[in-house]
Every structure is written in structure tokens, then in C-alpha cells.
Amino acid sequence: MSSSFDKYQKRRLISSYFSVALSIALVLFLLGLLGLLVINAKKVADHFKEQVTMTIYLKDTAKDVEIKQLEKSLAMADYVKSTDFVSKEQAAESMKAESGEDFMDFLGINPLKNSIDVHLKADFVTSEKLDVISKEALSKNFVDDVNYDNDLVNLMNDNVKKISFWILLISGLFTLIAVLLINSSIRLAVYSKRFTIKTMQMVGATKRFIRRPFIWRSVKLGIVGAIIALIGMAVVLYYVDKMFPELTLLNNPVLLAGLFGFVFALGILITWISTFFATQRFLNLNTDRLY
């Protein structure tokens, strides 16, 4: 009978530890994913900004040497990521493919112009900087026009600012929630041992001696939970990078290592602090109030 009861108690204890470790793992996993979002938010925003195209239309009188010189100067400019020359024939073929009709059959001529598509670096995709770059290109006598979607640029920059603000706000809120949830799980685990704590105290054990095994056990659960969370983060990061390689999520290993280290340390720190204060509460509690 006693053996069955001991086995039952052991199963309950293991189940309790498993629940605490799983709770810690889930909270740290979600916090880690939010951390990945925070550190890659600028990279994602920059990726979309760099998809904005500034098109420089060239006059029909533009000489090949002038076009080549312009391409070379653009390639060397610190604000340009890439350039692509599009001849009027290529532009006509693209328009024909999109519309399904050959407009040259009606017009008899190709009214399109040779152009250079310019993809700018993200830091230069603002209305002010695009206006300066546009005026610089128009100052050349063989450039006919410069075109870009100014409304899209303004909308994109406004949305990036709003999203960045909310990400930071949610990150702070979620960190607080994570601390409270882990603290609650640890307090419940310590609460189930409140009579053991008080019994040890009554036979003369010091507070430090009583706290030590509880803290060490919670720290081990924190380590287990953190490792599970880190494995989950690594799997998600791997598959997202595989699906969107253009985001180059794995190109900053130092920052990623810092985030993983932060999540691991947080798992240990929160469990240590939570257990310390939880055991301290029951150590200072009167025996009558244990019930």
C-alpha cells in the first residue's frame, strides 16, 4: 500500500516538474520568436524598400557612350543597390506579354524609350532623398524623365514607423507577461511543498539551506525549458530562412547568438528569482496560515 502511494506521489511530482518545464519552454519560445521578429524587423522593412524602382527614361538621341557612362556612375553611387538597362524593344515585349496585344501593330512604331531601372539602398528610399537623386539624373541633357511611386514610398515609410513602434511596445508587454507566467508556475510548484519548507524550518534548518534545493531544482527546470525553447526557435528560423532566403536571416550569427543566449539566461534568471521569493514567502509565513 505504501509502495503504491509512493509511486503515485512520484508520478505527481514528475508531472508537476514536466508542467513547469513545459510552461517555461512555451513562454520562452514565444518570447524568442518575438525577439527574432524585433532583430529582423529592419531587415524585412529594408527588403521591401529595396523593391521600389526608380526608372530613368532616356532620350532617343542619347548615345551609347553616355548611357554606359550613366550606368557606371550609378553603379558606383553609394545610394544604388543595383541597376538594369531596359531597351525600348525589351519594354515593348514586356508590355505585349502583360496585355496580350501587340500595340505596335496599331501604331506602326515603338513609342517607348530606353530606360534604366534603379534599385536604391533602403536608407535612401525616402521622398526627400529620391527627389534629390531624381533632380541629379534630370540634370543630364540626355535624360528625358525620372519616374518613381512617391505615394508608395511615403506609405511604406509611415507603416514601417508604426509597425516598429508596436513591435517594441508588444515586446515589452510580452516580456512582462512571460515573467509573470513563469513566476506563477514556480510559485505553484513551491506552494505544493510549503509544509516541507515549514517542517525543515521547525527542526532548525536555516533559510539559506532550505532555499538551496528548491532554487537548484527550479534552475534545472529553467535550463530544460530554455533548451526546448531554443530548439523550437532554431527550427522556425531554419524553415523561415529556407522559405525566404532573400531576407538572409542567418547572415548575422553574432546577433542571433546574443538572442539565444539572452533567452537561455532569462530562463535561468526568472526561475531563480521566482523561486527565491516564493520560498521566502513561505519561510516567513506563520504556521497557522499554511492552511
Image (tube, helix red, strand yellow):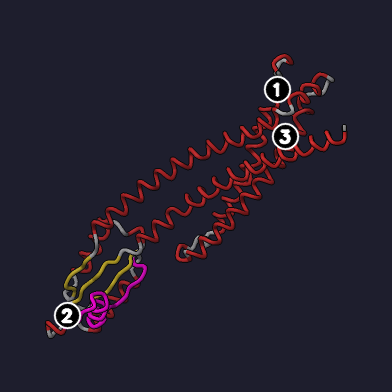
For this rendering, which residue is in front, 179 or 287? 287
Above or below residue 145? Residue 232 is: above
**Residue 251 coordinates in the image, percent (x, y):** 52, 62
| Residue at the disc numbered 2 | 103
> Residue 215 bears which disc, if any?
3
The residue at the point 48 percent across, 66 percent down is 245
Q: Along the horizontal axis of the image, is 267 left or right of 112? A: right
Q: Along the horizontal axis of the image, is 12 left or right of 114? A: right
Q: How many marks?
A: 3
The type of residue carrying mark 2 is Phe
For this rendering, which residue is in front, 198 or 208? 198
The type of residue carrying mark 3 is Ile
**Residue 24 coordinates in the image, percent (x, y):** 63, 42
Q: Residues within 10 Å of mark 2 (few under 14, many from 20)?
A: some
Q: Report the magenta residues as a range.
A: 80-104
The residue at the point 48 percent across, 63 percent down is 248
Q: Residue furthest left?
A: 107
The residue at the point 64 percent across, 38 percent down is 269
| Residue at the disc numbered 1 | 282
